[in-house]
Image (cartoon, rainbow, N blue to C red):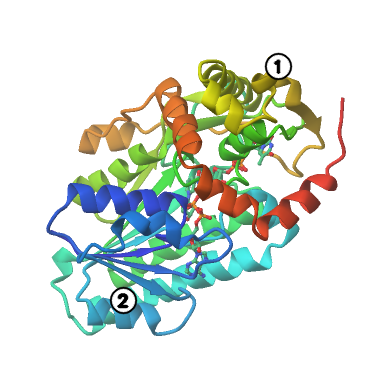
Amino acid sequence: MPDLLVTGGAGFIGANFVHYWLREHHASRVVVLDALTYAGNLANLDAVRGDARFTFVHGDICTEGLAAGLLRDHALDTIVHFAAESHVDRSILGPDAFLRANITGTHELLKAARQVWLDEGRMPVERVRFHHVSTDEVYGSLGFDDPPFTETTPYAPNSPYSASKAASDHLVRAYHHTYGLPVTTSNCSNNYGPWHFPEKLIPLLIVNVLDGRTIPVYGDGRNVRDWLYVEDHARAIDAILGRGRVGEVYNVGGRAEAANIDIVRRVCALVDDRLRADAALRARFPQSPAATGGDATSLITFVADRPGHDRRYAIAPDKLAAETGWAPRETLATGLARTVDWYLAQEPWWRGIMDGSYRDWITTHYATRERVG
Ligand code: NAD
Ligand code: TDX
C-alpha cells in the first residue's frame, strides 16, 4: 500500500482526497504539506487530525529541500500534488503568485522526487509515483459544437492560471522523459462539493443565496463548464495510482456540461426548496428570499465579464474509463443536492471564512465589477 505526500491537502480537493484515501486505504500513511494560504484551512482536515496514519506539515512547496526531507524522513513512495493557486479571477489580478506556486513549486517537488527516489535510490523505482493534479483549462476554450477535449488536444491556455498549470504539466512530462521519473497526470474538469472555498461559482452561489446577497453572473451566463463531484475526482486519482500507466495523462470529467446560468437556477431552486420545507432553516437564514416567500433567482445580477473568459470546457474521460473502469457515481442532480445539504449543515465552516479577511477581498472584487443588463 502506498504512503503518500499530499501537497495542498488543506485545500478543497486535497482535503476531500485525504478523507477519501484514509477511509478507503486502511494500511496507508498520509503526510500533508500545505502552506495554508487564504485557500488552505486546517479545519478542512479536522476529522483526520487525530488519526495516527496522518501527519500535517505547515510549509511551502517552493522551499528548497523541504519535500525531499519529508520523503526521506517518512519513507514516502508517492506524491499526489494538488498545491496550487487555483482561482482564475485572482490570476488575472495578480499572476506572479501563480507562476511561483504552480511552476516553481511543482519544479521543487519534481527535483525532490528525482533526488530521493532516483539519485539516492531510497525506494524501488517500480514502487514510486509522482501524480500531478491538473486541469482541463490547459486545453483552452471550445465552441458550442466542438467535440470534448481529449488527451491529445493541443494545449492553448488562456489565463495566467491555466498557463501556469500548462507549464507545470510540461515540467512533469519532461522529468519523465529526461530522467525516467515515474509520473502520471490527470486533467480534470470543474469540481464542486464539500469544503469548496466560497470564491468559486457553486459555493459562492449557495452562501450568497442563504445570506440574501446578489448572485454575480459574468457576461451572458452562457459559458459552459463540465462539472464533477469532488469525491469522484478522488476516486479517479485512486484509479490512476492503482491501474494507470506510468508516463500517461488521463482526462477526468463528469460528462455533466451545464451553462453557468443553468447551474445558478438549479442551486437557487435547491436552496429555495430546502427553506420552504423547513421553518428552522427559514429562521436561521432570514435574509434568504425563500424565508419571506420570495425566490432566490431574484438575486441574479449580470456583471461585467471575466477578461478572456473561456466559453466552454468539456472533457472526454474515455481513456480513464477504458483503462481503469472509473466512472462518476454522482450526477449533477445528486451532487448538487449533496453539496447544498453540506453547506446547510456546515454553516460554522463557511461563516468562519466569510467573516474573516476574505470578506474584504470579495467586497472589493465585486465592487469593481460593473452591473450590465
Ligand atoms: P484550493 O485553492 O482550494 O487549494 C489549494 C491548496 O494549496 C490550499 O490548501 C493552499 O494552502 C495550498 N497551497 C497553495 N500554494 C502553496 C504552496 N506554495 N505550498 C504549499 N501549499 C500551497 O485548490 P483546489 O480547488 O483544491 O485545487 C487543487 C488542485 O486541483 C490545483 O492544482 C488545481 O489546479 C487543480 N484542479 C482544480 C479544479 C477545481 O475545480 N477546483 C479542477 C481541476 C484541477
Ligand atoms: O461570481 C462568479 N460568477 C460567474 O459567473 C464566479 C466566481 C464565476 N462565474 C463563472 C466563471 C466561470 O465561467 O462561473 C464559471 C465557473 O467559475 P469558477 O468557479 O471561478 O471556476 P473556473 O474559472 O471554471 O475554474 C475552476 O475549474 C477549473 C477552478 O477554479 C480551477 O481551479 C479549475 O482548474
Report which quarter residue 361 is drawn in.
bottom right
- Ligand 2 has an atom within 8 Å of the beta carbon of the residue at disc 1: no
Label 1 is placed on what type of residue? Answer: Gly
**Where 220 sits versus 151, above or below?**
above
Q: Quadrant of the C terminus?
A: top right
Q: Mark 1 highlights which residue?
A: 294
**Where 301 sits versus 165, above or below?**
above
Report which quarter residue 160 is drawn in.
bottom right
Q: How many numbered marks, from 0 up?
A: 2
Foreground pick, 66 / 37: 37
- At x 65%, y 31%, the residue is 209
As helix, strand or loop, the secondary structure at mark 2 comes to helix
Which of the marked residues, 1 or 2, is nearer the chain's N terminus? 2
- At x 43%, y 34%, the residue is 228
Q: Mark 2 highlights which residue?
A: 114
Q: Residues within 10 Å of mark 1 (few under 14, many from 20)?
A: few
**Where 282 sits versus 354, above or below?**
above
Image spot of residue 108 (x, y percent): 44, 76
Image spot of residue 362 (x, y percent): 72, 50
> Does any portion of residue 242 appear in the rendered image?
yes
Image spot of residue 365 (x, y percent): 77, 50
| Mark nearer the viewer, 1 or 2 | 1
Label 2 is placed on what type of residue? Answer: Arg
Q: Residues within 10 Å of mark 2 (few under 14, many from 20)?
A: many
Q: CA distance from mark 1 to mark 2?
A: 58 Å
- At x 78%, y 29%, the residue is 301
As helix, strand or loop, the secondary structure at mark 1 comes to loop
From the viewer's perspective, tell me whether residue 256 is left or right of residue 17: right
- At x 50%, y 34%, the residue is 344
